[in-house]
Amino acid sequence: MNRPTAVITGGAGFLGSHLCDRLLSEGYSVVCVDNLITGRLSNIEHLTDNPDFDFVRHDITRDLHLDQDVDCVLHFASPASPRDYLELPIQTLKVGSLGTHNSLGLAMAKGARFLLASTSETYGDPLVHPQSEEYWGNVNPVGPRGVYDEAKRFAEAMTMAYHRYHGLDTRIVRIFNTYGPRMRGHDGRVVPSFIQQALAGEPLTVFGDGSQTRSFCYVADLVEGIFRLLKSDVTTPVNIGNPREMTVLQFAEKILELTESESVIAYRDLPVDDPKIRQPDITKARRELGWEPSVDLDAGLSETIRYFKGEPTSIPGAHPVGAP
Ligand code: UDP
């Protein structure tokens, strides 16, 4: 029997590589497309001998031609940590715009379903709390984060245009803060930063006074939500994230507790336009997908801490700190 084929752009990244694993285990052939500017081969090296897995090193801001039939295209390529997209502003804008256009074009050419990885950043620094899909957001287009937020907002608009104008079968997931094994140790995001700082006995760098909030979703829960969305018939955006909200300072204390670290907290300047609050309203995901997160924070963080210690986890391809 022929396996359906999924193309995953950004497939060597944190989320993309977990999606490669999941789709392979669901019986798909997977073509992983990545230019490796923030993705890593180490995230997918456990798949290289799998006959149903192909890696194509390619920048999706350029045309992509594939010979084989394709059943779905999942567009996950983009720098996704604030540090990365501030260092790669043009690439971030290009992959959200040209990369989305090319990925949509591939889906059109193949008659494939298209799923866009969008983000809670489409809500910007939100004035509505928690954020439901109906909220249009509060984004500063000309601030430093605008390169990511506006690229993703453009990507959503482009996806809906292909859906409405060309009748393309599309899905949009708005991903809230997610963590787990295979995050890059030095991507600057709060989860790997605090864990690595705590394990090294270095101060945990809390930006601002630490009163800003985030809601952290374990990667296995996120992948389950995305897979359900892919299989559903919901063509409007769906939030996937964990509604358990906490301040960044509470999160720092949680990391100190779980790592049994003696590190102190060091306060640093709050980045420009850093959202003050963030919590997904997942009513729609519950109703339409029958999905909600099931991994509690301590369990997910403990697994992630094991990963950063270089200890075995239930996730294949775990690499110790500092691995490429
Ligand atoms: N943050 C922090 N210290 C760090 C990294 C991040 O206090 O070393 C804060 C950051 O200011 C933000 C939150 O943690 O309020 C989450 O930041 P992250 O970069 O993980 O992702 P964001 O949710 O901002 O996209």
Image (cartoon, grey):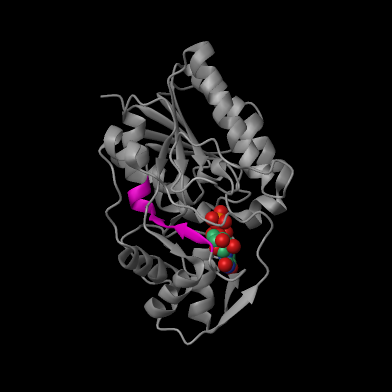
Nearest the viewer among 226 and 154 is 154
Residue 187 placement, left or right of 217: right
The picture quadrant where one finds residue 96 is top right
Which residue lies at the image location 53% right of the left edge and 81% below the top edge? Answer: 200
Is residue 141 visible to us here? yes
* Figure quarter occupied by ligand 1: bottom right
Can residue 22 be seen here?
no
Give yes or no for residue 114 being in the magenta stretch: no
Snapshot quadrant of residue 153? top right
In depth, the one of 276 and 262 nearer the eye is: 276
**Above or below 291: residue 318:** below
Which residue ends up furthest to the bottom in the rendered image?
Answer: 262
The quarter of the image holding the N terminus is top left
Position in image of residue 154 (x %, y %): 62, 31
- Quarter of the figure that contains the C terminus: bottom right
The relative height of residue 206 versus residue 113 in the rendered view (above or below) is below
Taking depth in this image into account, of 150 and 6 the one nearest to the observer is: 150
> In this rendering, would 41 be left or right of 27?
right
Give the percent coordinates (x, y) of residue 322.
Answer: 55, 69
Up/down of 220 relative to 8, above or below: below
In the rendered structure, does residue 217 fall within the stretch colored magenta? Answer: yes
What residue span does the magenta drawing correspond to? 212-222
The residue shown at (34%, 36%) is: 284
